[in-house]
Amino acid sequence: MSGLLGMALGWVERAIEQEKTFTNLGLKARILEGLGRKDEAAPLLKEAWLVATEDDLGKVGGQLMSNKQYAEAVPVFELSVRGNPGSWKAHDQLAEAYLKSGDAAKALATYAKALELAPDEATKKRLEETLRTLRGG
């Protein structure tokens, strides 16, 4: 198995030479862990989070939400909002994570910010309805 992991490590290192992405850095970290080189994997995981795009974070957070790991999704979506403060979608995802993890006050404030940034009428209408429901009206 280490022969296959060694080959995979070579491939992912070539990909990283072209461009460092959340996916290829994370993959290299997992390969290194599989090879028993955990001390080399940890810095790669940290670097992966630093280069993660809004879409990357949305996928990771979405998977956590699907697994009902709401509290674990919150910091992922918070990172997305910090990196993409003008994104209605990042705020919307964070608001849902706050709501499902039990923090209604933060959910309300974050849904309000998502509404402020919403790009179209359909999105604005959905967010207004969500806010109205949360406010009990």
Image: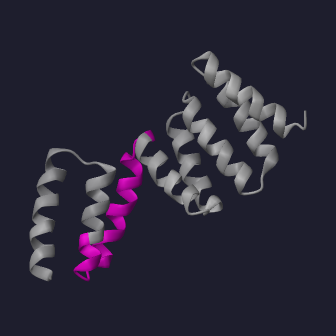
Determine the residue located farthest toward the top in the rendered image.
Answer: 121
Q: Is residue 103 magenta?
A: no
Give how far across and how far down residue 27 sits, in percent: 27, 62
Is 61 placed left or right of 111 in the picture? left
Give how far across and how far down residue 31 sits, in percent: 24, 71
Out of 55 and 65, give the one closest to the viewer.
65
Query: Which image quarter: residue 44?
Result: bottom left
Q: In this view, does 128 lie above or below 17?
A: above
Determine the residue located farthest toward the right in the rendered image.
Answer: 137
Quarter of the image containing the N terminus?
Answer: bottom left
Give how far across and how far down residue 56 sits, in percent: 41, 47
Q: Magenta region: which residues? A: 31-54
Residue at the spot x=73%, y=49% of the render?
99
Residue at the spot x=90%, y=38% of the render?
136
Residue at the spot x=67%, y=46% of the render?
96
Q: Is the magenta stretch mostly helix, strand or loop?
A: helix
Is 7 placed left or right of 110 in the picture? left
Q: Is residue 49 magenta?
A: yes
Give how far across and how far down residue 59 sits, in percent: 45, 49
> Does residue 36 appear anywhere in the picture?
yes
